[in-house]
């Protein structure tokens, strides 16, 4: 990978989950799920994936959002998968809304699965009109060391490494009794990809995209950069890396706009300086007033 320009801010992996670019990359890469079973995530998930569904959700006439992943199973049911570091009540309300919207859009029932790396303090949402109880999977409760030890044993005796592609993409989010970090496990997963996908370069690139995007929510920008820099092969033009870089630019524009708003600058002036639309700046102003803006 080319050396990063000193004036270029780090890639912003935490801000890719509602953008069209990420949805396009995931839609292309997550086709690897078709024909596979997700029972390794949770035994409550039965059936094989038959299709990748649209995750675009129109929230108003002018604003759209994207749920993380939506899959159709051979049981004629849908699976909605979200990744969240810390699950809040607001997240539950949002995911419940996505669940209903996806069900209405695709005309099938959906189960929501939330992938996390922390013990959840909120396990569902209930009001007078809705009861929402997703499947919550804390992958830190699993042991990556055990998986990697078995892979190493198989490699030593010349056997197939015995780890499925779908299992591999979530491996960086597992716990580690030996203290391996998520970034270290991400590096391991990227290096194992050629052994799993063999000589299929296109499949390897899709796996890299999924591993990078699904892990991006859970590692810092600096950690992600270090791992990508250490794995140069196929990374400069990998579509997932391009998404992260574009998101970094968008995030920097928003941070500049927030700082300018706090200094009392005019909305039109901020728009001219940052390239953000006045509508977006008004949204940021609302976030500042509600205490949500960083």
Image (cartoon, helix red, strand yellow):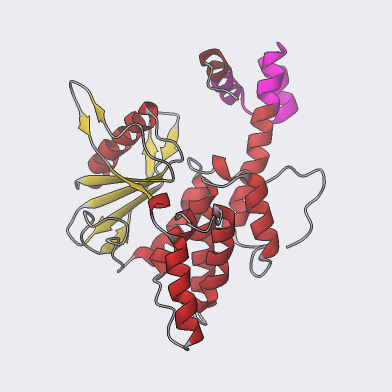
- The residue depicted at 70 percent of the width and 21 percent of the height is 259
Q: Nearer the viewer, residue 220 or 112?
A: 220
- Give percent across and percent down for residue 122: 33, 31
Magenta segment includes 92: no
Q: Is residue 171 above or below residue 259?
A: below
Magenta segment includes 257: yes
Quadrant into which the N terminus falls = bottom right
Q: From which residue to which does the magenta span run?
A: 256-284
The answer to whether residue 5 is left or right of residue 207 is: right
The answer to whether residue 158 is left or right of residue 244 is: left
Residue found farthest to the right: 6
Q: Is residue 196 above or below residue 177?
A: below
- The residue depicted at 49 percent of the width and 43 percent of the height is 17
**Residue 281 is at least partly visible in this image:** yes
- The residue depicted at 53 percent of the width and 43 percent of the height is 16
- Give percent across and percent down for residue 214: 48, 52
- Give percent across and percent down for residue 45: 23, 56
**Residue 11 is at least partly visible in this image:** no
Q: Nearer the viewer, residue 221 or 242?
A: 221
Quadrant housing residue 257: top right
């Amino acid at each position: 990978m080319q050396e990063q320009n000193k004036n270029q801010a780090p890639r912003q992996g935490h801000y890719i989950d509602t953008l069209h670019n990420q949805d396009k990359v995931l839609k292309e890469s997550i086709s690897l799920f078709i024909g596979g079973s997700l029972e390794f995530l949770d035994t409550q998930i039965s059936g094989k994936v038959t299709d990748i569904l649209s995750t675009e959700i129109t929230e108003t006439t002018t604003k759209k959002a994207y749920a993380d992943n939506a899959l159709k199973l051979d049981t004629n049911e849908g699976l909605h998968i979200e990744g969240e570091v810390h699950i809040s009540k607001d997240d539950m309300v949002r995911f419940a809304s996505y669940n209903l919207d996806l069900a209405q859009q695709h005309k099938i029932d959906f189960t929501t699965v939330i992938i996390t790396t922390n013990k959840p303090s909120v396990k569902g949402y209930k009001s007078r009109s809705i009861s929402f109880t997703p499947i919550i999977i804390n992958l830190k409760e699993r042991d990556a060391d055990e998986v990697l030890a078995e892979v190493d044993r198989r490699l030593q005796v010349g056997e197939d490494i015995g780890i499925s592609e779908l299992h591999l993409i979530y491996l960086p989010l597992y716990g580690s009794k030996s203290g391996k970090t998520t970034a270290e496990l991400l590096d391991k997963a990227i290096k194992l990809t050629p052994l799993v996908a063999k000589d299929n370069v296109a499949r390897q690139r899709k796996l890299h995209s999924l591993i990078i995007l699904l892990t991006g929510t859970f590692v810092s920008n600096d950690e992600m950069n270090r791992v990508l820099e250490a794995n140069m092969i196929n990374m400069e033009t990998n579509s997932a890396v391009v998404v992260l870089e574009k998101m970094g630019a968008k995030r920097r524009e928003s941070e500049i706009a927030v700082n300018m708003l706090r200094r009392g600058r005019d909305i039109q002036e901020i728009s001219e300086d940052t390239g953000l639309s006045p509508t977006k700046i008004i949204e940021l102003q609302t976030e500042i007033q509600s205490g949500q803006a960083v």
